[in-house]
Image (tube, grey):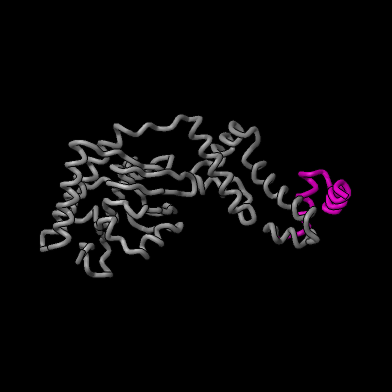
Amino acid sequence: MNRTNLFTDEHEERIFRILPICDLKEEERRQNQLPHLHNFYSIFWIQSGQAVHATDFVEYVIEKDTLLFVPPGLKHRMVLDQIATGYSILFNEEFLRYNRKEYTPIKEYDLFNNPEFKTLIKVEGDTKVQLNLLVKAMMDEVQQPDKHSQDVVLNLLHLFLLHSIRIFETQYQPISEEESDSLTIIRFKKLIEENYTREKSVSAYADMLQLSPTCLSEVAKKSSGITAGEMIRNRIIDEAKQKLFATDMSGKEIAYTLGFEDPSYFSRFFKKYTGLTIKDFRDRSRKKYQ
């Protein structure tokens, strides 16, 4: 494979790359196996073998004859087995907009953006043949480019995406409201685990989840029986209790570890939500297990 990128200038704002999966270098495979994110769209077409794709929220196996669509800014990892074949296609919004007066941003389609962070379509029969022809035509243009190649590839890519969107709309089944709430709580709990020493307000987590604070609190109450604020506070209190029981850290040290700038405020916070002072809790918990 002599050439995989349509653009040779490293400063070019537009990105387009197409590559057979079997031509991926070992270093690229290793990098894909680690959590990462990028600023372009990715399509992986697994034609034989299989792969495992995972985000912070879901993990699943991609079987043969399956297309995966990954948006920019999504942390993910991809493990390809050694016999996997197919194609990897990378491009950015700047390339999709190239030379087009009227353009619908790809992010407005569910193809790359849906609540499950899982966009897969199965391609078989005539559809598989059509998409294969488009991919091979893009490969030919990249291998032997001329002054028309960018326009040709752009139109071929748009055709590929339109076919994919059509398939996705027939195969995709939106999750129910109950399933959506469960997924939101799973994500919320994970965000709390990752951020509770830095972020303690409902609004901060609501922003991360792209929800309003009121909506997040309603989902939390409906799904877990307690408010979003209580879920955050409970995690902080649980960690404080663990440190008071299992370590000799002072209340001041624990306060700083948990992200409280004012140890006195932490002491009041702890007593308000446990009914005990820091000293009383430590004494009682240790006495109980002596």
Decide if residue 102 is in sight here: yes
Q: At which x and y percent is residue 273?
A: 76, 44
Q: Is residue 15 magenta?
A: no
Please report the bounds of the magenta region as a residue range.
261-290
Which residue does the image show at 43% across and 32% down from the upper left?
A: 175
Q: Is residue 282 magenta?
A: yes
The residue closer to the viewer here, 84 or 166, is 84
* Image-based side of 204 in relation to 125, left or right: right
Q: At which x and y percent is residue 182?
A: 53, 35
Residue 125: name its quadrant: top left
Q: At which x and y percent is residue 118?
A: 40, 42
* Image-based side of 82 in relation to 244, left or right: left
Q: Residue furthest front?
A: 83
* Image-based side of 168 in relation to 232, left or right: left
Decide if residue 101 is in sight here: no
Q: At which x and y percent is residue 153?
A: 17, 54
The residue closer to the viewer here, 39 or 28, is 28
Across the whole image, how many numbered discs are drawn on residues?
0
Which residue does the image show at 32% across and 33% down from the upper left?
A: 171
Which residue does the image show at 69% across and 50% down from the upper left?
A: 236
Which residue does the image show at 45% across and 29% down from the upper left?
A: 176
- The correct choice, above or below, for 39 with respect to 271 in the image is below
- The correct choice, above or below, for 226 with respect to 21 in the image is above
- The correct choice, above or below, for 5 with respect to 43 in the image is below
Q: Which image quarter holds the N terminus?
A: bottom left
* Image-based side of 284 in relation to 12, left or right: right
